[in-house]
Image (cartoon, helix red, strand yellow):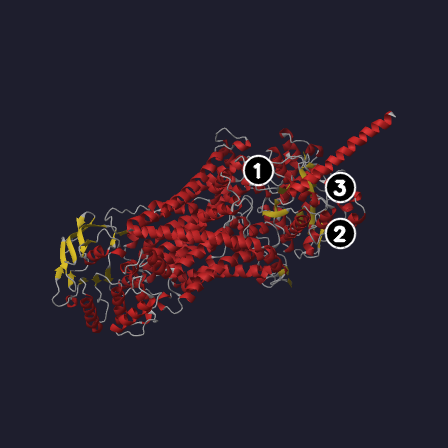
């Protein structure tokens, strides 16, 4: 009897809770109708721009939310703008309602209190996110996400190589050095402090550091020299055999795609496991290009969408963020012919039609299977980024 | 009546001084404070010089400054010297006439579009090497040469010379109209001097004062260029202006301070360089005096002449072929080294590009037209005020031409690096809560549109035969009627030309558009830079060509319209 | 008693460029100002017309039918002027050039007949639609005079109006101009350095250059 009573109490609380939850979301949807959401996102890729245009069209039709894609060349300048707005005490009607963000930009926004606050758990589709196997949806560059951004897609460092000039691909950083010695000038990586270049350096550090646990904690200046010495020795050995003898670095990983197509380089890097297939599909790369990763595994992370503190269309932004998490939108995004960006959802949680959507996504000819990709290595603690970038600039950007 | 007209027309210079002075000074203030470690919003409230220390100890900063100086000054000196050589040896010849013809389309090519095409051309895997590979070179894979993005910034400097050359030639052509070229040449020849010597000894020293401000603007531009430097300049470290933009965009907010210090330093570099050039000019005057009057009449070797001719042809050639390679890339599906032409062609990127660029194109057209139109009203207003002041109607002797200060303000936006004051302006706009409004965007474009329109129109406008308007007024018609029925219609060609230049300048604006437009307005140029941050050369080419096409339409109209309107008026044809 | 210049002197940087001028020109009369080039003849004319350059300072009084001109802007002085060049507006045809001079209140029909009549007096019937640049020098000079006269001026100023014409044309045009002035019965001031240009019986004023 006592038990029954307890259960009753629990049930009442629970149902009240979920009811409140549903009610709250209903209110958000109502408030969102008619809002215009300025979605600031990198605009450097035609397929991505087209995908965003498609998603905007859907939410306009279904929820009456108008989404305008503000194409940025660098999301950093969007962060700058929000900071300027804060400086000017512009507490509402900010120019940005939703932005594509992760890593350092997220840290900067969080530290400077430029984010609206926790919201992702309010999104009905959030429960489909794979928080168990994809730890990076909770820790963005080891910084707790605290629900202040909503996961959008997954990324993992992969290497692309042209099988025509390269018969056997390297399997580790040390292999890569051997390859570079044999093929001088046919490999490079993007300049730091760009995101892709930094990721390559972090990967190298993972493979070369003796105490890899040091990477998970905030950096200690006293250990930095010792921990990174193998990395700099490696780079010192590698650079003379790089493209342009390591005197010039490409400005981004995207630029390296063109270099790979021109055979200026034979091996390139990307943060999207599907990028080779996408580019082949799109005519940007020849179909002789394939993907590989190092046997030690490679660094992976998640990219998100976040709402700035002064957005006046945050309900609309949430409705759009929720749609971006829907199986429909995530499956479409994963299709190499559309964009080819891996999903953040746990497809095991899906059933029926929704699961079928993912099963129907074709696997590109140059894409590795999830098994081949394996478990991703976590990003080192965010404090490493700046220290590595600074040291790299000091050594190689003179 | 006339008294009040002069009073009314004073609105124009006052407005312009206000617009330019206040904007730029407040923009500079918005940069100065953070450079002194004052940016309360990120918790920096104590004024100190620590930011400057951080700036000067940033890794690679010395190289970055040196690269900036090297590429910027080489380009500026290169273009000035070459323009002088070109006039000296080519004035009036066939190549000169070709330049006169193609000047407008060449000038209208936006810097970013040209840089992209130029890069596609000269890269080790670019079209030039594809043309001769593997046949002549044996290259199956592209050579590992540092041609593009070279550490010293040579490719950037060359591209700047090619791009600035037509601009300086345009200013020169305007100024030549004010000098008695033919008479001086005749008189000099009668004294036994060769044409080239008359140019070098007599005409160029007289021409220089007319070009001085434009040369300063070229120096400032070359030292602070961002879009071309991103595409063609070195990357590690990049030129100062690019580095500053990176700092501004760095997620670590404390870099804002360094960026502010850096942009002030860049301004300082520009001021010093301008001073340097001014000193060179003064000492050249001093030194050359004896050379000018030494009476020597030596002639130049034909070889020298043909080198100058060849370089002129190169400039035309590179500009044209840079556009052609864009056309080829825009039609490409798959094109690998060393194929001379794409293996698979497609129209897909045009189809997509035209659809997705529709809105940005409309924004660009609308903003450019509005800025150029207002720019035109202000330019004509100021010039008319000026001309009126030179005529003494009633207040005999009391009228003073005190408009000199106007021109310093007017040219400020060309002399202060964009990045130095635009970031401060952004702050100002946000405080006034007018960021992200179209009117603010248009106004920021106007800052750059107006000086160029003024440069292009003032010489012709001032040279207008005043007796014609006097005559019209003596016929008893009011001033406004004379202005709108006689003077402006007669100046239609240069006015439309100046409009086209203003429009082209507006189209090319990148930094003002992203900073002032709050990202809410994407123009074709922000689209080009965005898409260029990706990898897809086919899409990049399509956008760059659309960007190139817009100003060209307006230039074409500026040329065709007077021809149609005055088809039967021989006196109006040039 | 019609066009009077009283103690008119023009100063440049504080010093007078010629001795003070006193002239009275009656309607239908033509007074000729002569002097070497650079003596300030044209400057004197621009003082009368109201287009004096800002570097000059003007002293004295200029009256037209008793009305002080110096306080009036150019377009209200009601003075016609002929230059060495015809100064026809190149973007208008002959008819429009002439129409531009006719007072606004005149009706369209009236304008047309006025222009027709004017062209006829100069032997240029049917020239309305012609492009100015298709005319000969003499024809242009005549149209230019017609245009000035159609504005119905109270006085006419002439700044070496015949100096650019062919020798053979000069006399013809001169006679035409002078006869028109007579016909309109307005005072005229002619500046020239060619003694042949002076009308018979007209006053002649020699302007002596102070600097020279």
The reply, left or right, for residue A261 in relation to residue B415 is right
Asked whether the viewer can see residue A82, the reply is yes
User: Label 3: which residue?
Assistant: A128
**Tag 2 or tag 3, which sits nearer the N-term?**
3
**Tag 1 or tag 3, which sits nearer the N-term?**
1
Label 1 environment density (alpha carbons within 10 Å; few <14, some 14–19, many ≥20): some
Q: CA distance from mark 3 to mark 1?
A: 32 Å
Mark 3 and mark 2 in contact? Answer it, CB < 8 Å. Answer: no
Q: CA distance from mark 3 to mark 2?
A: 18 Å
* Callout 2: chain: A
**SS category of the residue bearing label 2:** loop
User: Label 1: which residue?
Assistant: A92
**SS category of the residue bearing label 1:** loop
Q: Which of label 3 and label 2 is nearer to you? A: 3
**SS category of the residue bearing label 3:** helix
Residue B430's disc number: none
Residue A361's disc number: 2
Position in image of residue B484 (x %, y %): 36, 58
Quadrant containing the C terminus of chain B in the rendered view: bottom left
Q: Residue at x 76, y 33 (%)?
A: A16
Q: CA distance from mark 1 to mark 2?
A: 41 Å
* Residue at the top extreme of this rendering: A2
């Amino acid at each position: 009897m006592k038990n029954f009573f307890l259960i009753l109490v629990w049930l009442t609380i629970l149902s009240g809770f979920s009811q409140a939850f549903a009610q709250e979301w209903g209110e958000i949807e109502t408030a969102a109708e008619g809002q215009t959401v300025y979605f600031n996102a990198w605009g450097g890729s035609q397929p991505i721009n087209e995908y965003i245009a498609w998603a905007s069209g859907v939410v306009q039709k279904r929820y009456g939310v108008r989404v305008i894609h503000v194409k940025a060349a660098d999301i950093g300048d969007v962060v700058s703008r929000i900071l300027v707005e804060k400086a000017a005490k512009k507490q509402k009607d900010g120019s940005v309602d939703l932005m594509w963000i992760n890593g350092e930009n997220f840290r900067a926004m969080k530290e400077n209190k430029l984010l609206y606050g926790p919201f992702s758990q309010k999104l009905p589709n959030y429960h489909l996110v794979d928080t168990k196997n994809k730890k990076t949806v909770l820790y963005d560059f080891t910084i707790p996400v605290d629900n202040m951004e909503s996961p959008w897609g997954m990324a993992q460092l992969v290497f692309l190589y042209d099988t025509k000039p390269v018969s056997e691909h390297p399997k580790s950083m040390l292999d890569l050095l051997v390859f570079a010695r044999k093929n001088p000038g046919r490999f490079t990586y993007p300049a730091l402090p760009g995101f892709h270049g930094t990721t390559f350096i972090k990967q190298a550090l993972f493979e070369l550091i003796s105490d890899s646990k040091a990477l998970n904690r905030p950096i200690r200046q006293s250990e930095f020299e010792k921990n990174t010495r193998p990395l700099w020795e490696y780079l010192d050995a590698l650079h003379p055999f790089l493209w342009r003898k390591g005197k010039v670095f490409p400005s981004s990983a995207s630029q390296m795609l063109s270099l790979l197509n021109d055979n200026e380089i034979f091996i390139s890097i990307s943060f999207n496991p599907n990028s080779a297939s996408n580019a082949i599909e799109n005519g940007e790369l020849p179909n002789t290009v394939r993907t590989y990763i190092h046997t030690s595994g490679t660094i992976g992370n998640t990219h998100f969408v976040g709402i700035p503190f002064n957005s006046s269309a945050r309900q609309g932004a949430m409705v759009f963020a929720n749609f971006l998490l829907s199986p429909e939108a995530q499956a479409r995004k994963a299709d190499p012919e559309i964009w080819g960006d891996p999903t953040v959802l746990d497809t095991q949680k899906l059933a029926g039609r929704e699961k079928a959507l993912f099963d129907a996504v074709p696997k590109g000819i140059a894409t590795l299977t999830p098994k081949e990709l394996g478990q991703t290595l976590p990003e080192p603690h965010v404090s490493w980024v700046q220290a590595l970038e600074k040291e790299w600039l000091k050594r190689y950007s003179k | 009546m006339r008294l009040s007209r002069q009073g009314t027309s004073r609105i124009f210079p006052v407005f312009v001084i206000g617009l330019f002075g206040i904007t730029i000074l407040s923009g500079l203030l918005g940069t100065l404070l953070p450079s002194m470690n004052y940016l309360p919003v990120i918790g920096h409230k104590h004024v100190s010089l620590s930011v400057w220390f951080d700036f000067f100890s940033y890794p690679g900063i010395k190289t970055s400054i040196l690269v900036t100086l090297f590429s910027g000054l080489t380009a500026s000196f290169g273009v000035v010297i070459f323009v002088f050589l070109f006039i000296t040896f080519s004035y009036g010849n066939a190549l000169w006439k070709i330049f006169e013809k193609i000047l407008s389309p060449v000038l209208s090519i936006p810097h970013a579009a040209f840089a992209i095409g130029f890069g596609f051309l000269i890269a080790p895997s670019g079209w030039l090497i594809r043309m001769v590979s593997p046949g002549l070179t044996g290259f199956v894979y592209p050579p590992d040469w540092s041609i593009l993005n070279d550490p010293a910034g040579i490719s950037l400097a060359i591209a700047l010379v090619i791009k600035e050359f037509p601009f300086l030639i345009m200013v020169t052509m305007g100024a030549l109209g004010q000098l008695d070229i033919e008479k001086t040449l005749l008189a000099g020849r009668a004294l036994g001097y060769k044409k080239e010597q008359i140019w070098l000894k007599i005409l160029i020293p007289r021409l220089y004062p007319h070009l001085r401000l434009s040369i300063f603007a070229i120096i400032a531009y070359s030292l602070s260029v961002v879009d071309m430097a991103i595409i063609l300049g070195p990357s590690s470290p990049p030129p100062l202006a690019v580095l500053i933009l990176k700092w501004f965009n760095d997620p670590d907010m404390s870099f804002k301070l360094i960026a502010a210090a850096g942009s002030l330093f860049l301004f300082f570099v520009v001021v010093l360089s301008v001073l340097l050039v001014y000193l060179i000019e003064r000492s050249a005057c001093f030194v050359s005096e004896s050379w000018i009057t030494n009476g020597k009449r030596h002639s130049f070797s034909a070889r020298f002449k043909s080198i100058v001719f060849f370089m002129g042809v190169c400039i035309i050639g590179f500009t044209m072929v840079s556009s052609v390679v864009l056309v080829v890339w825009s039609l490409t599906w798959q094109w690998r080294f060393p194929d001379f032409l794409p293996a698979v062609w497609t129209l897909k990127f045009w189809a997509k590009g035209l659809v997705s660029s529709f809105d940005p194109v409309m924004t660009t057209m609308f903003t450019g037209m509005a800025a150029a139109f207002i720019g035109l009203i202000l330019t004509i207003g100021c010039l008319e005020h000026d001309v009126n002041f030179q005529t003494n109607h009633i207040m005999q002797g009391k009228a003073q031409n005190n408009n000199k200060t106007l021109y310093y303000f007017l040219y400020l936006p060309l002399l202060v690096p964009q990045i130095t004051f635009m970031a401060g302006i952004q702050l100002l706009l946000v405080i006034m809560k007018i960021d992200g409004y179209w009117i603010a965007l248009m106004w920021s474009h106007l800052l750059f549109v107006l000086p160029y329109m003024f440069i292009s129109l003032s010489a012709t406008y001032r040279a207008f035969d005043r007796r014609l308007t006097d005559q019209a007024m003596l016929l008893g018609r009011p001033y406004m009627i004379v202005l709108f029925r006689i003077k402006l219609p007669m100046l239609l060609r240069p006015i439309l030309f100046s409009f086209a230049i203003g429009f082209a300048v507006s189209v090319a604006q990148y930094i003002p558009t992203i900073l002032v437009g709050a990202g809410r307005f994407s123009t074709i140029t922000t689209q080009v830079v965005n898409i260029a941050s990706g990898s897809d050369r086919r899409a990049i080419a399509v956008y760059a060509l659309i960007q190139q096409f817009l100003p060209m339409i307006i230039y074409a109209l500026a040329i065709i319209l007077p021809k149609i309107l005055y088809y039967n008026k021989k006196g109006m044809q040039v | 008693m019609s066009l009077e210049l009283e103690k008119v002197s023009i100063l440049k940087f504080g010093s007078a460029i010629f001795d003070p001028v006193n002239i009275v020109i009656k309607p239908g009369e033509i007074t000729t100002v002569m002097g070497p080039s650079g003596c300030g003849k044209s400057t004197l004319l621009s003082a009368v017309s109201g287009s004096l350059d800002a570097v000059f300072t003007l002293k004295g009084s200029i009256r037209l039918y008793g009305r002080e001109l110096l306080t009036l802007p150019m377009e209200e002085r009601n003075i016609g002027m002929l230059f060495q060049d015809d100064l026809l507006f190149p973007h208008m045809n002959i008819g429009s050039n002439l129409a531009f001079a006719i007072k606004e209140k005149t009706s369209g029909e009236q304008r047309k007949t006025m222009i027709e009549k004017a062209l006829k007096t100069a032997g240029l019937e049917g020239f309305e639609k012609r492009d100015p640049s298709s005319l000969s020098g003499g024809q242009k000079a005549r149209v230019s005079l017609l245009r000035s006269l159609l504005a119905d001026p109270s006085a006419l100023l002439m700044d070496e109006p015949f100096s650019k014409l062919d020798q053979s044309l000069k006399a013809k045009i001169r006679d035409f101009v002078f006869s028109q002035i007579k016909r309109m019965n307005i005072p005229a001031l002619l500046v020239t350095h060619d003694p042949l240009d002076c009308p018979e019986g007209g006053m002649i004023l020699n302007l002596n250059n102070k600097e020279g």
